[in-house]
Image (tube, helix red, strand yellow):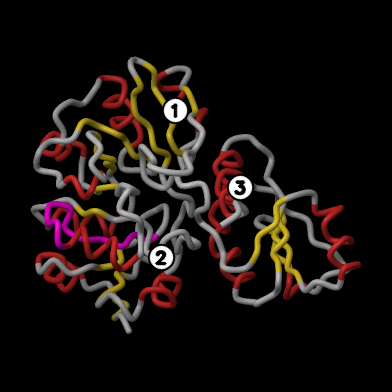
C-alpha cells in the first residue's frame, strides 16, 4: 500500500523519477505526475483507467510560471487568474509545444491552474516542471477528499499519498476559457459564477459533453458511485422504495427522515449551507456507496451559488452508464 506522509522530499524525488504521487489541493486530491514527461502522463491514464480523450489539468506554483507553457494569455483570463489564483479556477489557454499532446488529448488548449494548498504549493515550487493531476480515483468514480479515500482506491498502485488533511472546498475547480470573445464556463466548480461575473462581467455556461470533451471532467457519466444513483424528489422516492422493499440509502441537502435509520442517510449540510454541502459531497457519496445497498436516492440542491456545481456532479453521478 502507499505511504501516507507529509514528506515533500520523498514526493519530489518520486516525481522526478517519473513516478506518481497523490497530492492534496483545496478542491480534491490529485494523482500527480510530471506533465512534461509523456511516460509519467501515460501512467496517470493507465493508473486511473482514464480514456485518453479526456484531457488533464496541469498545476503550477504561481501565475508567472504560466507563460512557459502557453502561447497566449488573453487579458480577460489573466484578469481572472490575478483575482482568483491560487484557488479553484482552471483556465483553458493555447498550449506551447512544451506540453505533450497526451496531456491535452490532442487539443490545442491546455487546462492550467495554481492550487490553493500550502503543502502542494511548496512541492510545486521545488520542482522544475508542472504537475498533471486529475482526481486521484479510478476514472468516473467519486473524487477523493481525504488521504484514506485515495488509499482505498489507488493505494496499491502508487508509492506515496502526500497527506494534506481534508480538502477545504471539496468540489473540482471551475474551468473557464474563451470562445471567440465570449468568456465561457466549461465546468461548474468550486469558484462561484457570481464571483467570476463580478470581475469580468456576464459569462456563458456550456453544457457538459458526453464524448470528446473540450476540457477535463466533462463526460456525461462521471463522479459516480458503484451503487445505482437515483436523483429526484425524496418526498416521493422514499415511500416508493419502502413500498417496493428495495434496500436504499438517502443523500439529502439538509433534511433527515425519521423512517430511515441514521446509518443509511446523510445530509450534506444540516444547516442548509451550500459551502458545507460542497465540502461533504464526495465523502458522503462514498460513505453511502460503502453500505452496499441497491440504490442511493438523492435530491438536487438549491440551484444558486455552489449549488449549481453540486447539481452538476449529482446529475452526472446519476447518468446511465
Task: Tell me the distance, in whole angstroms, between the alpha carbons under discs 2 and 1.
Answer: 29 Å
Q: Quadrant of the C terminus?
A: bottom right
- Mark 3 closeness class: few <14, some 14–19, many ≥20 residues within 10 Å: many
Q: Nearer the viewer, residue 288 or 83?
A: 288
Residue 253 appearing in the image:
no
Which mark, residue 196?
A: 1
Q: Which image quarter: residue 280?
A: bottom right
Look at the image and say whether residue 33 sits in the magenta stretch. yes
Front residue of 84/282: it is: 282
Image position of 29 with respect to 4: above or below = above
For the point 69% across and 46% down, the residue is 300
Residue 77, given in percent of the width and then of the height, sits at 30, 26
Disc 1 secondary structure class: helix
Q: Which residues are magenta?
A: 29-39
**On the image, which quarter does residue 49 sit in?**
bottom left
SS assignment at label 2: loop
- Side of 50 where 123 appears, left or right: left
- CA gap, disc 3 and disc 2: 19 Å
Q: Which residue is mark 2?
A: 137
Residue under label 3:
315
Instruction: Estimate how packed mark 1 is, as few (under 14), some (14 to 19) or many (20 or more) residues with alpha carbons within 10 Å.
Output: some
Amino acid at each position: 500500500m502507499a505511504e501516507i506522509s507529509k514528506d515533500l522530499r520523498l514526493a519530489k524525488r518520486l516525481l522526478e523519477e517519473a513516478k506518481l504521487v497523490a497530492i492534496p489541493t483545496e478542491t480534491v486530491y490529485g494523482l500527480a505526475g510530471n506533465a512534461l514527461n509523456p511516460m509519467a502522463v501515460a501512467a496517470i491514464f493507465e493508473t486511473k483507467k482514464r480514456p485518453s480523450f479526456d484531457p488533464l489539468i496541469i498545476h503550477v506554483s504561481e501565475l508567472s510560471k504560466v507563460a512557459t507553457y502557453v502561447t497566449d494569455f488573453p487579458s480577460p483570463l489573466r484578469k481572472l487568474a490575478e483575482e482568483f489564483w491560487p484557488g479553484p479556477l482552471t483556465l483553458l489557454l493555447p498550449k506551447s509545444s512544451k506540453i505533450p499532446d497526451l496531456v491535452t488529448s490532442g487539443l490545442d488548449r491546455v487546462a492550467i491552474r495554481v492550487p490553493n494548498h500550502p503543502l502542494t504549493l511548496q512541492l510545486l515550487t521545488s520542482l522544475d516542471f508542472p504537475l498533471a493531476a486529475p482526481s486521484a480515483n479510478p476514472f468516473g468514480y467519486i473524487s477523493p477528499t481525504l488521504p484514506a479515500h485515495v488509499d482505498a482506491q489507488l493505494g496499491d498502485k502508487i508509492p506515496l499519498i502526500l497527506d494534506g488533511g481534508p480538502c477545504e472546498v471539496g468540489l473540482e475547480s471551475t474551468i473557464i476559457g474563451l470562445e471567440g470573445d465570449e468568456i465561457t464556463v466549461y465546468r461548474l466548480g468550486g469558484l462561484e459564477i457570481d464571483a467570476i461575473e463580478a470581475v469580468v462581467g456576464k459569462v456563458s455556461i456550456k453544457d457538459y459533453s458526453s464524448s470528446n470533451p473540450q476540457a477535463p471532467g466533462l463526460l456525461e457519466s462521471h463522479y459516480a458511485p458503484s451503487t445505482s444513483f437515483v436523483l429526484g424528489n425524496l418526498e416521493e422516492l422514499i415511500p416508493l422504495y419502502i413500498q417496493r422493499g428495495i434496500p436504499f440509502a438517502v443523500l439529502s441537502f439538509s433534511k433527515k427522515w425519521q423512517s430511515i435509520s441514521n446509518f443509511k442517510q446523510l445530509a450534506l449540510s444540516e444547516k442548509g449551507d451550500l459551502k458545507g454541502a460542497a465540502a461533504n459531497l464526495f465523502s458522503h457519496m462514498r460513505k453511502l456507496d460503502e453500505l452496499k445497498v441497491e440504490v442511493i436516492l438523492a435530491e438536487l440542491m438549491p440551484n444558486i451559488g455552489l449549488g449549481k456545481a453540486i447539481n452538476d456532479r449529482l446529475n452526472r453521478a446519476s447518468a446511465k452508464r
